[in-house]
Image (cartoon, helix red, strand yellow):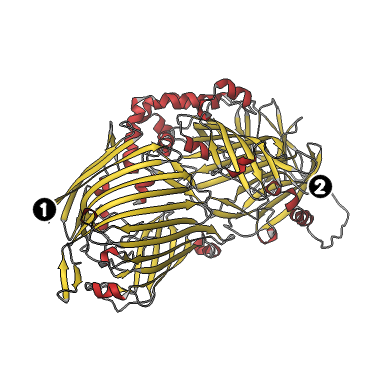
Amino acid sequence: MTFFYKFSNKTPALRMVFFTALLLSAALLFSQEVTKITGMVTDAATGEPLPFVNVYFKGSTVGVTSGFDGRYSLETRKPADSLLASCVGYHTKSYAVKFQQFQVADFKLAPVNIDLPEVIIKAGENPAEIILRKVIANKNINDPAKVEEYRCQAYTKMQFDVNNLSGKLQESRIMKPFRFIFQQMDTSIVNGKAYLPVMLSETVSDLYFRYSPRSRKEIIKASKISGIENESISQFVGSLAQEVNVYDNFITLFQKNFASPINSSGLLYYRYYLVDSAAIDGKWCYNIMFKPRFKQATAFTGNLWVNDTTFAVKKLDMRIVNDANVNFVNDYIISQDFDKVSDKHWMLTREKQMADFNIFEDAKKTTGFYGTRTLVYSGHSFEPPPDIKIYTMPTDIVVLNNAVLQTDDYWLKTRPEMLSHREESIYRLADTLLKMPVFNTYFDIAQMIMTGYYVKGKFEWGPYASIISANASEGMRLRAGGRTSNDFSKRLMLDGYLAYGLGDERFKYKTGFTYMIQKTPDRVLSGSYKYDTEQLGLGQDALREDFFLSSLFRRNPQDKLSLVEEVQGSYKHEWFTGFSNTLTFSNRRLYNIGKTGFSLYDPQGGSYEPHFSLITSELCLDLHYGYREKVLAGEFERVTVSSQYPVLDLHYAYGIKGLFDGDYEYHKAQLRITQWFNFLSAGWSKYSIEAGKVWGKLPYPLMKIHSGNETFWFDEYAFNLMNYYEFVSDEYLNVMYSHHFEGFFLNHIPAIRKLKWREVVQARLAMGNTTNTNLVYNSLPVGTYSLGKPYIELGAGIENIFRFIRVDGIWRLTYNDHPNTSPFGIMVSMNFIF
């Protein structure tokens, strides 16, 4: 299962994840460095929430407007003794402020009784919509992403905080060694949750942007991360990690499209209200509040300030609506400030994003964490860079070699704003924890649960989910093995295992190595020797053959395994992130076990003769290209985080007859294109197109075996009602497409809406052909066929059941006359997605 791979200890993100998870503990409120106030404004007579109320510190310019739900929050570092709430038609009310403390101030405003003369109101156009149309008409002029060329410096600060902590766990025995960390507690003005800062990162970058031909580059010249020194992580804490451009029609967050409040068709998604006008930095602006037209929409609520002459966005404050169909995110707030930095350019100068994450629905009672990112842009220039070659760099983000080596004096001089005392303490806290033996012991236990491996010194034992399994060929199977840890080496990793089948009374084993010649870009040398059973025609997302659950949830017996003896060596050369070549040589012996046999035509005898083994010597060249692909790299493993563009994989193999007893000469070519993309606000789609051809007279196990699935576990990259070995081809085309509606229809059904279920549909097509030469050469076993007409599967399902369960109904539309097949099946899977 990919779950174990993605959370491997070989990736540095795990230590940060556990670092946060360990601190899910207590909730005490300590001293504040700023005055933080949050609350709600209601009508004293009716108790109804009051929107558009001005809440501000007396004698200052610090203030906010209450939202549609009457709630507000604000903070200040300056002394203030009174907080006022005022609104037309209500008496102004004040609250005595306690300096440098967190406090909740709820206002109940009493209506003003005024006798007014009769007024006749005639229907007219909403003034907010008039302004909105002018904003939309000037988007191309004011959008920073439409500027011909610019460069600037960016300072990025990211912080992670554990929130909603429990006092019981703080006093528990497990947290006794770490009680000193709770002196750093603070309180959020967003929802009043107590939180503990646990991770802080800072970067200073030079940004370069060119509109045509489009190019956007970031050079990270300074990076500082508490407790972690890793260049790949620095890429994800830079300024380009999560871009939000309000001028785009849709803003992509958590792989979902949220309609921008100034979407060109904004009236289809939002209701707008003109609530105020004022001078901001000497420029008169209109304040427009907005909220979604429909429940559970992937949209925002908030307000924006628009300049009255250029109709550019001056200031933006918005958050994801609280009933949006998004998992694990209880709140997401975006604040942006724009300034006119030249005669005609409005540019983003400051941005703050804050997310409140929690695994459970009841975020008020369970522990979660905050993620906060602050960006400050300065020194804008609209002249070409001194070196125009910057735009042709192969990667979008470059981390300089000395980025993590900058001194404290550098940071003091470069930061546009000073760190608070509490923020400075995070660096010291992380360094202290990482040096504590008890912390590392807890980390090892959590790591075993999350990765499937138990780390003991220089070795990792596992994966434990394969210790015991069963299949029809081996009977009960026992396995023990593992790999060297990062303490052994960060350049060389050795791995291997020993397995024994109680039924066939045979030992199986594998040993291998991975050597990192160079990192980022990677140059990797690896090799392995394997003698073990293998299921040919397995999908790339399928359960491992010896995963203990794979022997339980099956619709057919696991009796189609082959015994494989293989020596393999490879070299991977990454030219830049997203583009690599891999050269592989393998000598492979395939032995006949189980029900599948190798019966091949002998022209001399004029009959089919049984073959007990097939030997190949194969040289392969692979090419991988993902445009602007983002990758999180550990010491040995890499996880692709995202790519908005089609990803191309090209595979070529040449079989060398006579080399190391190779029996066959052949050529194989395969092209695969995959991509996921959002479709307006109606969810997202993913497709995979794979085409290939085999040249040469070959036994059917060496041709294309179309990926089947004989378990009840849904495989995204296989035909789920197709049996293993059911179809073979020497030229083929496979197309797979799925669309996830993200609740687009179910969100409109009141009885189901609260469940936050999501719809998904899919279609899968396999087309292929087997040349007459190979048809004559092979006597296909019972249950194995050549494709004549297309094989088609359609499916519909519900995902996000209890936030992670997915259930699919699959219909097999063709070849239903084959034995041991079904025209319909129910499949289950688990997906941890936003």
- How many angstroms separate mark 1 from mark 2 (CA)? 83 Å
Question: Could you tell me residue 760's position as x and y percent?
Answer: 46, 64
Vertical side of 286 occupied by 556: above or below: below
Q: Which mark is residue 9?
A: none
Q: Neighbour class for label 2 at 10 Å: few (<14), some, many (≥20)?
A: some
Q: Is residue 753 left or right of residue 83?
A: left
Q: What type is the residue that disc 1 sits on?
A: Glu
Residue hosting label 1: 505
Which of the 4 image quadrants contains residue 786?
bottom left
Indicate the quadrant where residue 551 lies. Answer: bottom left
Residue drawn at x 56%, y 23% is 421
Point 35% across, 57% down: residue: 653
Q: Is mark 1 on a helix, strand or loop?
A: loop
Say what amino acid the circle numbered 2 marks.
Asp
Q: Position of residue 570 (x, y in %)?
A: 33, 47
Residue 339 % position (x, y)? 74, 39
**Residue 72 seen:** no
Q: Looking at this rendering, what residue extends furthest in the right direction?
A: 117
Q: Residue 308 carries which label?
A: 2
Q: Which of marks 1 and 2 is in front?
A: 1
- How many numbered badges does the structure rendering display? 2
Q: Determine if residue 382 is in view.
A: yes
Whether residue 333 sits left or right of residue 742 in the image: it is: right
Towards the viewer: 598 or 271: 598
